[in-house]
Amino acid sequence: MDESAEPGLRIREGDCAVLKRDEVFKAVPVLRRRKVIFEKQWFYLDNAIGHIYGTTFEVSSGGSLQPKKKMEESTTETKEAGTDNRNIVDDGRSQKLTHDDIKALKDKGIKGQEIVQQLIENSTTFRDKTEFAQDKYIKKKKKKYEAVITIVKPSTRILSTMYYAREPGKINHLRYDTLAQMLTLGNIRAGNKMIVMETCAGLVLGAIMERMGGYGSIIQMYPGGGPVRAATSCFGFPESFFKTLYEFPLSKVDSLVSGTFSSETLTSETECNVPVEEESNGSVKEKTTLIQETEEESSSEAVMEGIETEDQETMDLAAEDAEYKENKERGSKENIREKQRKQQERRRKLVETAALLEERNADGLIVASRFHPTPLLLSLLEFVAPSRPFVVYCQYKEPLLECYTKLRERGGVINLKLSETWLRNYQVLPDRSHPKLMMSGGGGYLLSGISVTMEKIQSDASSLEAQKIEEPTSKKRKLQELHC
Amino acid sequence: MSFVEYRDTIKDGDTAIVFLGHESMFAVKVQHGGKTQTKYGVIRHSTDLIGKRYGSKVTCSKGGWVFILHPTPELWTMNLPHRTQILYSTDISLITMMLELKPGSIVCESGTGSGSLSHAIIRTVAPTGHLYTVEFHQQRAEKAKKEFQEHEVEHLVTVKNQDVCKNGFGVSNVADAVFLDIPSPWEAIGHAKSALKIEGGRICSFSPCIEQVQRTCLAMEEHGFTEINTLEILLRVYNVRTISLQIPDLGKASEDNSGAGFDSSNQSNQGGLYGVLQQGTAQFKSGVPLKEMVGHTGYLTFATKSLF
């Protein structure tokens, strides 16, 4: 297989890879001689480098990864089995092997498969279980003792699932299927000029970048000192994707909308060179970048797992911190020149971005943040061309009710829809197919619509449109409904 | 107009979407001299459409007005002529993300049906990807081809009129993803596997019946697919309404006014949550679910082909 033909096919040092075991994911940087903890196992990724993404490994003694060969499933000989559980008593004594016995087996280096076999043989009730129960028992033991890890390439599917399971607070509890809806409803595709406002650790931005494939442009609005793009760096996009990624501070939006924006009014706040700290759940740990970019305006921090202390092992914090301090102390003159040059570059980019926004011809707007959506929508829609979709995500329904109402008053939008999606997983096995026991209780809400040309006479648009769009009041209803 | 790129003004030959109001819209083929009837009157293409900006309001002959929208696969899905039951954007969204589609992806699909999903896939894989779509019904295959041409996307799609269960997709080891929406998907799993790249890819099968799903999952397992996962997604829509509820008259306690209850005659305690519209009512905004919702479209089964 020719590596040059398909870049990104093989695991390389410096990549962000995702470890997968059953339904559990964890993003880690691929670094040599760096211990990784995942699902109660410790290992090094060195042996994985060079393999194709999607390869499954076993952790062998010493913490090295060995590719797992696909084993032939043991032939299904008709095993002895019972018909039901009426005589099975769960007294906790059916397994004759003790904790220590099992530990001894593990220490001896016995393979997981063999341990499972031992457990079966030493279970007094195994042969009384029904075939289904035996199947379930074996699956359960395999899951525990036959630990295999697959290394997969990051993608929106994988990262959004991972974040929702591990760090939902960081992404405002945006469930992955809701994100999927946003990408489609927003007609996200190559060539668009998108405006994005998100506080989901950069996951939504990354998803949009993936769907745009490096074509077109994205203007990311951000609160505070700079955008958080921790998740974005996990995607592993090529540098070229970032050339058409712009950012603009929310604090300057009002001036832009009212036409009073000018580069002279830039204050020192936008020229701050302190790396932005993680915002969402108050965890303020400064983490340095994975790939060596010392960005000062945006924090492309590769925070793989957020606040878990396991991070410390996989990040070379100490070394990079020292380097940073060293640079600070060395040659202050050089430093000042460099600082000025960077400030000028930042200012130039800001003016460029403002000009892009002022064209008011964006192809779409995506909002997914912890802020109240209404003010964001009302101002950012000004920069969107007519006949373009917009999608707003909110963890809660009520702010979107208000947003809907305000948008109706404003006019210039049609096809407003407030929705949520239900997602349900199934177990599919012969004679045992049914929905799974647990399902997600909620994945957030979406308000979507299409922009149209604004009416010069406001009353015309809102009242006529409201009349046309809402259904007529039924005379018999006890509830008195008023049109919003 | 283009289904894979935004253009600003309406041109002769475009497919545009006429929006009349609440969930009322239809697609129209813009033509010089063309006329379209709506309940608000006639729209004359040459004067009212051609050269106008997408998103503009157009006044019809009887005085009412409509909006003309740029087509998108989502709008197309809501307005295309049905030749078969189609997939709607809710399922399409999940399929797109779970199959990891993006610009440059090579996708195989069967059956083409009415082209609802096809248009969405083409939009996502453009400009460098490709869709190979297989439809065993000759007329449907023809109609799909014609539509792709009209929508200026024929360079991104290849339509084959054959039976995918017997003859596969017509390509080998090129696809990043395969999608099946056919009566017997288990018969096509083998072909799907060979259409997918050697190093791996994603597959999705959509089936309304659980029995089909069971057979398909078994076939996937037998062919060495991993990460087999079945799920379903449903859309819940809410109408935003301002509701006024009457406050019940619980009578008055004689003389003693110490009642801490919801006293309708005392307007001052209503602060915050409820705006008292008039004596005896409480008003609030609500997201009201629709009376009926789609409860089932089909089960989506995803899986991964990998080397190991």
Image (cartoon, coloured by chain):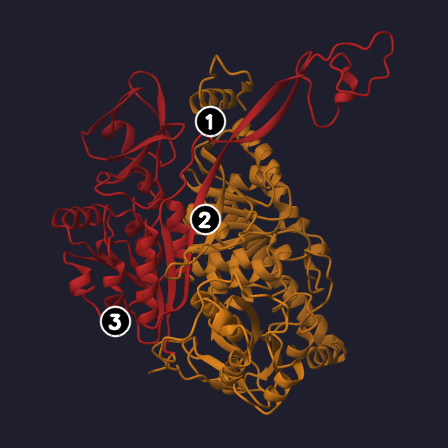
Q: Which mark is residue A113?
A: none
Give the alpha-carbon distance from disc 2 to disc 1, as whole Å. Answer: 29 Å
Q: Amino acid at mark 3?
A: Ser
Mark 2 = which residue? A181
- Disc 3: which chain? B
Q: Residue at x 64, y 45 (%)?
A: A371
The residue mark sitting in front, 2 or 1, is 2
Q: Colour of chain A?
A: orange
Q: Quadrant of residue A61?
A: bottom right
Q: Secondary structure at mark 2?
A: helix
Name the quarter where the C terminus of chain A is drawn. Answer: top right
Q: Secondary structure at mark 3?
A: helix
Q: Residue at x 43, y 71 (%)?
A: A81
Tell me if B47 is positioned left or right of B249 in this view.
left
Q: Amino acid at mark 2?
A: Gln
Tell me if A460 is positioned left or right of B101 in this view.
right
Q: Which mark is residue B194?
A: 3
Q: Are marks 1 and 3 in contact (CB under 8 Å)?
A: no
The image position of residue B91, as x and y in percent, is 38, 49
Looking at this view, name the residue that lies furthest to the bottom: A108
Q: Secondary structure at mark 1?
A: loop
The image position of residue B176, as x and y in percent, is 33, 67
Residue A11: in sight, yes or no? no
Looking at this view, name the residue that lies furthest to the left: B138
